[in-house]
Image (cartoon, rainbow, N blue to C red):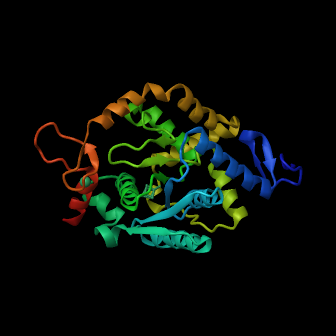
Amino acid sequence: MRCRSCRRPGVIDVRRHNAAFCGDCFVRHCQEQVRKAISQFDMIAAGDRVLIAVSGGKDSLALWDILLDLDYDVDGLYLGLGIGEYSDESGEYARAFARRRGVALVEIDLPDDLGFDIPTGARVARRAPCSACGLSKRHLFNKAALDGGYAVVATGHNLDDEAAVLFGNTLRWATDYLGRQLPVLPASEGFVRKVKPLVRLGEREMAAYCVLRGIDYIVEECPMAAGNKHLAYKEALNRIEEQSPGAKATFYFGFLERASQFFTPEADADKAALRPCDECGAPTPGKSSNEQTMCAFCKLVQRAAT
Ligand code: Q46
Ligand code: ZN
């Protein structure tokens, strides 16, 4: 197995590209894939300040590293979820990376700053933990970006994540979600732009990138993930990929090229119907009458406080 670019001995093969790479060329390959994704989907414009949501895991730290090396102006945002040791440890990895690269890390701690943790918040709001968590992340990442004057929020969702989410949404024909499943969600009233620059790279590639670059990250999965459907979809797609290398990329990019436009009108209509939350001002599905409009995040905070 020789490196596709320089013919030195390869250290990783990427079956999807039918290619192997040495360490240096693999790091360049990852940078190139991120650069291509950014330009293909117009993710970040010159001068944009970027806030990257870092979890302490391999994907977000690798993406932060790559964006810094590509000379983007990018600060990190770490959200402490209050999930026991998992959160304590993942925060340490995010802080260690920021120290090592000498970059800024904004921190929000759910228990300290908002008075609840994900396990408790989910229980009192009668939501699944990942649903309460996803809701909190979406709300707080957007708010932190608006408050800090950032143009873009970047997340470390990779090709495996996006293919698994697409698979789940397709199985349920969740047309509203399908209309929003894009690598870029443009800015609109009350929302900053959201981008996923890792869509051209898989999970295994991000783990290899971190090893080659000496980036320490939390290896354990979040304990709340056990048994969730997302993992089952990932496993199913991994088995398909094993048989047909490239199947995930064909599935995901084929959707973007040939199918996503059929679902965007529904998502656009949903967006047009949003009204500001009476509590925090964030756009939320509004009521037609004079009833109070409260966003799902404010409801979660309210329930968790009682
Ligand atoms: S952190 Fe949050 Fe994930 Fe943990 S509670 Fe679920 S959504 S699994 S990416
Ligand atoms: Zn609100």
| View extreme (left): residue | 290
Say which residue appears at 45% left-offset and 68% top-offset.
106
Up the image or down, 186 lies above or below 113; here it is above
Closer to the camera in the image, 193 or 19: 193
Judged from the image, the quadrant occupied by ligand 2 is bottom left
Number of marks drawn = 0
Report the quarter where the C terminus lies: bottom left
| View extreme (front): residue | 47
Say which residue appears at 57% left-offset and 48% top-offset.
197
The percent coordinates of residue 205 (x first, y second) are: 68, 52
Say which residue appears at 38% left-offset and 54% top-offset.
142
Closer to the camera in the image, 7 or 220: 7
The percent coordinates of residue 207 (x first, y second) are: 65, 57
| Residue 276 shown left or right of residue 261 in the figure | left
The percent coordinates of residue 212 (x first, y second) are: 73, 62
| Residue 226 shown left or right of residue 18 in the figure | left
Image quarter for residue 73?
bottom right
The percent coordinates of residue 291 (x first, y second) are: 11, 44
Say which residue appears at 24% left-offset and 47% top-offset.
276
| Residue 63 shown left or right of residue 108 in the figure | right
Up the image or down, 191 lies above or below 245; here it is below
